[in-house]
Image (cartoon, helix red, strand yellow):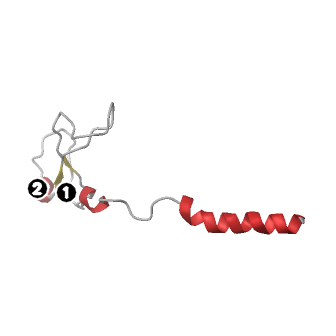
Amino acid sequence: MHKCRLLTVIALIVICGNFVSGQNGGVNRGKYLIHISETDEPITIDGILDEKTWESAETTGKFQRVTPTDTGFAAARTEVKLAY
């Protein structure tokens, strides 16, 4: 009787494990990717994008609101460029 319960619990864990493991692929995930550039040039973090790296770096923006509600785009426009 004890073995039967144990096997039932293990079977449920294995079967239900696929349903509770989360999303395998995000919905619209491709729309929210940014490609980060690699650079050998030293970058000064001063808010002035005068280095050559920033000319070819991909720009992203259109951030979504999170609080108080998660509908629509953020009111303040922000652009981001990334490099390493």
Camera-nearest label, 2 or 1: 2
Quarter of the picture containing the N terminus is bottom right
**Considering the image in quadrants, where does the C terminus appear?**
bottom left
| Observer-nearest of 24 and 53 | 24
Q: Residue furthest top?
A: 68
**Above or below 63: residue 4:** below
Left or right: residue 37 compared with residue 9: left
Nearer to the camera, 41 or 82: 82
Tag on residue 41? 1
Note whether residue 27 is visible.
yes
- Position above or below: 78 against 57: above
Residue 29: x and y in percent read 31, 59
Indicate the secondary structure of the residue bearing disc 1: loop
Query: Can you give x and y, in whole percent of width and height, for residue 59 in the image?
Result: 16, 52
Which kind of residue does numbered mark 2 sit on?
Lys
Residue ID for mark 2 = 52
Residue occupying the point 82% across, 64% down = 5
Most extreme residue toward the right is: 1
Please name the residue shown 73% across and 66% down the image. 10
Image point (22%, 42%), residue name = 45
Lateral position of residue 10 relative to residue 55, left or right: right
Q: Which mark is residue 72?
A: none
Crowdedness near tag 1: few (<14), some (14–19) or many (≥20) residues, C-alpha within 10 Å? few
The three-letter amino acid code for the residue at tag 1 is Glu
